[in-house]
Amino acid sequence: MAALPRLPQNLMAGGMSVAVRLPLEPGAVAHRATRNFAPVEGFPSRTQHFVVPACRPDEDPCAEFTAGWADHFGAVACTEPSCFPESMGDAP
């Protein structure tokens, strides 16, 4: 199995967020973050948001980190088309 690439460098400078399944450790996969919204039970006029991977929006929520922080801990880029396919050129 080939190693996954590092996160795109342009995400670091911009302070962009990524979605990561815990624990955040070397080899954890960082996804493009997207959000699902749901009403707050008992408060119909309020909503809460959940951070999920863009490539799997129907999965359970993930933790949200800045791309720089995730990279610092050794997270790698998800290369699915809806996440970071452009990273494939950065694979070791």
Image: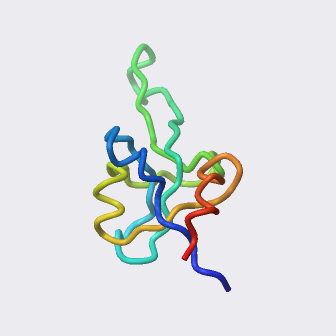
Left or right, 9 with reference to 65: right
In this view, the residue farthest toward the right is: 81
Above or below: residue 88 compared with residue 91:
above
Left or right, 69 with reference to 84: left
Q: Residue 90 lies in what quarter of the image?
A: bottom right
In this view, the residue farthest toward the bottom is: 1
- Image point (67%, 46%), residue name: 82
Instruction: Name the spot of residue 84 as percent of width and height, x first.
Output: 59, 52
Left or right, 77 with reference to 72: right
Instruction: Name the spot of residue 62 as percent of width and height, x first.
Output: 45, 54
Identify the image's colour scheme: rainbow, by chain, secondary structure or one colour: rainbow
Of the pair 33 and 60, the residue shown nearer to us:
33
What is the count of numbered marks? 0
Of the pair 16 and 34, the residue shown nearer to us:
16
Above or below: residue 63 compared with residue 5:
above
- Image point (64%, 60%), residue name: 79
Above or below: residue 7 compared with residue 42:
below
What quarter of the picture does the N terminus occupy?
Answer: bottom right
- Image point (45%, 17%), residue name: 44
What quarter of the picture does the C terminus occupy?
Answer: bottom right
Instruction: Name the spot of residue 55 as percent of width and height, x first.
Output: 65, 50
Above or below: residue 30 compared with residue 5:
above
- Image point (43%, 24%), residue name: 47
Q: Residue 40 lies in what quarter of the image?
A: top left
Instruction: Name the spot of residue 5 as percent of width and height, x first.
Output: 54, 68
